[in-house]
Amino acid sequence: MDTRMFGEELRKLGFTFFSGVPCSYLKNLINYAINEYDYVAAANEGDAVAIASAAYIGGRKSVVLMQNSGLTNAVSPLSSLIYPFRIPLLGFVSLRGEPGVPDEPQHELMGKVTTQLLELMDVEWQYLSKDLEEAKVQLIQANEQIARNRPFFFVVKKGTFDTEPLKKQQNSIHSNQTIRHAHKNNQTPTRYEALAVINSVKDRDTVQLATTGKTGRELYEIEDASNNLYMVGSMGCIGSFGLGLALSQPGKNIVVIDGDGSLLMRMGSLATNGYYSPGNMIHILLDNNAHESTGGQSTVSHNVDFVNIAASCGYTKSIHVHNLEELRACLHEWKETKGLTFLYIKISKQSKAQLARPRIKPHEVKERLKRFIQNGPIKIKEVDGS
């Protein structure tokens, strides 16, 4: 089928933001997306889902593209981000290892279970027709599902798209301009204390994204507000989610609050963030050297120099913060100067006792955040933490 004509049908339906990981079966559609649309090359398929999901919340109709082997990499965000938040993404997944079609041995099992896997995750799907007129009808059907807040995936067989040459790509280079290493003792405040400082600095243009576990729950207790999002699953995806929202909403200040266990799980996202380098995003790592939400098991963060890693990935500023005063000062500085910024602060393993869970459902969090982005802030309630 004519790739460009198919791409124009996507445009007519409003799909203009793409993220994915290459596959030879999808290369022509990916090339077209790179040539004609906003395309974010993710480090892995799970990150691509997170990036596209946030772009949808930011007002863009989004598409993810991946090989079916990478579908397994995307299971976590598809099942614990897309499903509970009811985020309607359009997806294209290749059918490597299709039964009866010669292919490499590593694709054999995935070729058998790709569609079953989509069904298990409650994702509507169809085999994409190679006939353009039939494919147009399928796109309309998919768009109807998207309008109902349902994801829809096309399974793409070999030879579906005709040749679309990749235009010469201009690779940009974003390098670190400021790096500040540890040079004095760390105060190691509690997570709650650090979150309270972060929350106190926000303004009417701020969106706060909190990673999975106690980080989101403690932010909820400090203040549940329409400009907060609490990631209930998809561990490791908050940085990529922040990238998608920052790119789709350049007028908002995107504050990403991460944890050491989370960031270690998907460190490739640092490279993607550094390359696309949204100046309206600040990435704050609260490191307690533990998976505290699941019992306090140690992470390997004590053996990792996150400040240097973020700097080498292209974050404009990468700063070791020693105490709450420095944290507050760095946040104020970022609001004035912008630039993709990474803040690292060591915190204690202590958590707030009797920690509540959000009483608002994830899909309600998504909807009110969309309203906040479109219409401005609407405060829901305040909790004093007592």
Image (cartoon, helix red, strand yellow):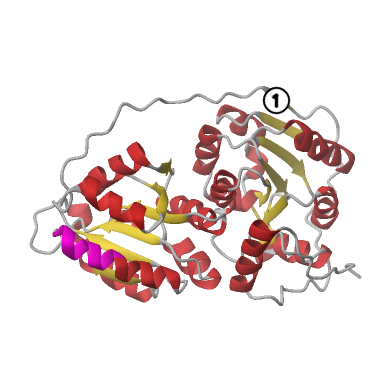
Q: Which residues are magenta?
A: 131-139
Query: Which amino acid type is marked by label 1?
Result: Ile
59 horizontally vs 113: left or right: right
Looking at the picture, how far across and down is residue 101, in whole percent? 9, 58
Residue at image mark 1: 179
Q: Identify the secondary structure beneath mark 1.
A: strand
Residue 272 drawn above or below residue 115: above
Q: Is residue 295 visible?
A: no
Image quarter of residue 336 = top right
Q: Which residue is painted at 72% across and 38% down in the image?
A: 343
Lateral position of residue 339 relative to residue 132, left or right: right
Residue 97 visible from this viewpoint: yes
> Is residue 309 located in the magenta-colored stretch of the structure?
no
The structure residue drawn at horizontal position 83% and vertical position 63%, both measured from the top left corner, is: 222
Q: Residue 48 in the image: x percent, y percent?
A: 44, 51
- Frontmost residue, 3 versus 311: 3
